[in-house]
């Protein structure tokens, strides 16, 4: 089994609980978390003992989206970093969407950007009274990613 550094993993009674665990960085997605989320999605899909999957976050935020500080630190290599992060994230989203077990998202705080995308990807989304949802991409001059352009139109419909 993979030992996670940015996620907490619990499995009991047929339920896998994945907790985003970078509270000091608002549970933002850096390269390591995106990769670990993909690995966790594969694990959930392959383990026939898992009958439901819950994703939540530690601290005040569900997920602030992409780790903008890591984008800044990448300097001239930011485009490559973003492509790698989104490749892992999209792979995780696709695996979660296709697995047999239902995906339950427990939004405990703000879900922004890619965190918003992750939040709306669930078969069931539970939001605490502290939950807030925002696309946030325009704030950093980016276009939506993390599969929100796939999931949101299907949830809202043609109108």
Image (cartoon, grey):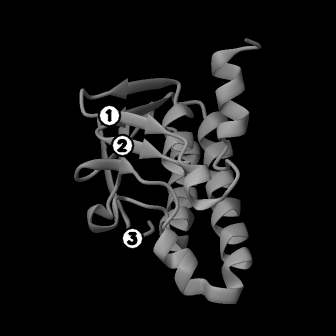
Q: Position of residue 12 (x, y in %)?
A: 28, 41
Q: Residue at x 71, y 61 (%)?
A: 87
Query: On the image, numbered disc 2 is attached to which residue?
Result: 110
Location of the C terminus (image quadrant): top right
Q: Is residue 82 visible?
A: yes
First in sequence: mark 3 vs mark 1: 3
Q: Residue at x 27, y 67 (%)?
A: 24
Q: Residue at x 44, y 35 (%)?
A: 133
Residue 157 falls left or right of residue 27: right
Q: Secondary structure at mark 2?
A: strand
Q: Position of residue 137 (x, y in %)?
A: 59, 51
Q: Nearer the viewer, residue 104 or 62?
A: 62
Q: Residue furthest right?
A: 158
Crowd around label 2: few <14 · some 14–19 · many ≥20 (10 Å): many
In which quadrant of the rendered view does residue 154 lie?
A: top right
Crowd around label 3: few <14 · some 14–19 · many ≥20 (10 Å): few
- Pointer 1 with pointer 2, Cβ within 8 A: yes
Query: On the image, numbered disc 3 is attached to which residue?
Result: 3
Query: On the image, numbered disc 1 is attached to which residue?
Result: 131
Residue 137 falls left or right of residue 11: right
Q: Position of residue 129 (x, y in %)?
A: 24, 27
How many angstroms separate mark 3 from mark 1 (CA)?
29 Å
Q: Nearer the viewer, residue 13 or 108?
A: 108
Q: Secondary structure at mark 1?
A: loop
How many angstroms separate mark 3 from mark 2 (CA)?
27 Å
């Amino acid at each position: 089994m993979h030992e996670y550094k940015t996620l907490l993993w619990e499995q009991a009674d047929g339920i896998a609980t994945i907790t985003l665990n970078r509270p000091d960085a608002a549970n933002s997605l850096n390269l390591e978390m995106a990769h670990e989320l993909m690995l966790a999605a594969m694990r959930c899909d392959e383990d026939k003992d898992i009958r439901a999957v819950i994703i939540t976050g530690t601290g005040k935020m569900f997920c602030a989206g992409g780790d903008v500080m890591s984008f800044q630190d990448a300097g001239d290599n930011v485009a490559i970093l973003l492509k790698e992060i989104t490749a892992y994230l999209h792979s995780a989203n696709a695996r979660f969407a296709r697995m047999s077990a239902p995906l339950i998202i427990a939004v405990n705080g703000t879900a922004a950007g890619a965190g918003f995308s992750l939040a709306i990807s669930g078969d069931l989304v539970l939001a605490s009274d502290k939950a807030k949802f925002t696309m946030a991409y325009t704030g950093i001059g980016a276009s939506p990613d993390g599969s929100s352009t796939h999931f949101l139109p299907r949830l809202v419909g043609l109108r």
